[in-house]
Image (cartoon, grey):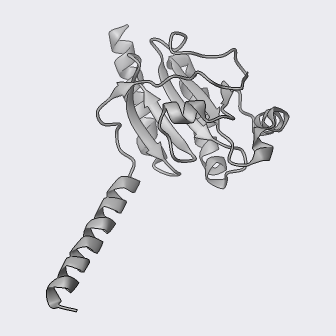
Amino acid sequence: MRPITFLLAGLLLTLALISSVMASRETPADPPGAMPSLAGAAEWLNSPPLDLQALKGKVVLVDFWTYDCINCRRALPYVKEWAKRYEPDGLVVVGVHTPEYAYEQVSGNVRDQVRKLGITYPVALDNNYAIWRSFDNQFWPAHYLIDAKGKVRYSHFGEGDYEAQEQVIQALLREAKAIE
């Protein structure tokens, strides 16, 4: 091979690696867009069905998870704590259980796990991936933070960065209080 071919191949490999790293980071949703629909759930647990109108004026954390996902299990204590701590300030946590395996589609199994895991906030059973597709989601767990005006302001994929996520929750709640 000629030296120029090696140089071009190396350059392409470097660009591919850089774009892969950049795509894997959590980032504020850019540009902020309207909150996608929560329509299409097979069933709702802990709540009647929620829609955009019911969430108007609230700061919302949408948590895509599935009960047999270890990463989701590791993130769950943080999500539950945020729901408990910030609900009086106007935060609404919505769990969207989007199953990876067939047994996770059985509503009785999900209901049992929600009870065992101590989840008290609303959970949508997204068996046909309607909400997943609405958000154009690709990951478990995935967190989307929506401001009181209904705009997606932040997203995080995977575990970690819990302090940063909590800071965004706090900032969005302050903003919501200022516009009341």
Q: How many marks can you see? A: 0
Quarter of the image with the C terminus is: top left
Residue 41 falls left or right of residue 14: right
Quarter of the image with the N terminus is: bottom left
Location of residue 76 by image quarter: top right
Q: Residue furthest bottom?
A: 1
When the figure is inspected, residue 68 is found, relative to residue 178, above or below; the finding is: below
When the figure is inspected, residue 6 is found, relative to residue 109, above or below; the finding is: below
Looking at the image, which residue is at 69% across and 35% down? 127
Looking at the image, which residue is at 71% across and 32% down? 119
Q: Residue furthest front?
A: 1
Residue 73 falls left or right of residue 135: right
Where is residue 54 drawn, in percent x and y?
55, 11
Where is residue 29 drawn, in percent x and y?
35, 37
Location of residue 123 by image quarter: top right
Where is residue 6 drawn, in percent x and y?
22, 85
Where is residue 171 drawn, in percent x and y?
37, 28
Q: Residue furthest top?
A: 180
Looking at the image, which residue is at 16% across and 90% down? 3
Residue 39 falls left or right of residue 114: left
Location of residue 43 by image quarter: top right
Looking at the image, which residue is at 33% across and 67% down? 17
The one of 3 and 65 positioned closer to us in this rendering = 3
When the figure is inspected, residue 157 is found, relative to residue 46, above or below; the finding is: below
The one of 131 and 74 positioned closer to us in this rendering = 131
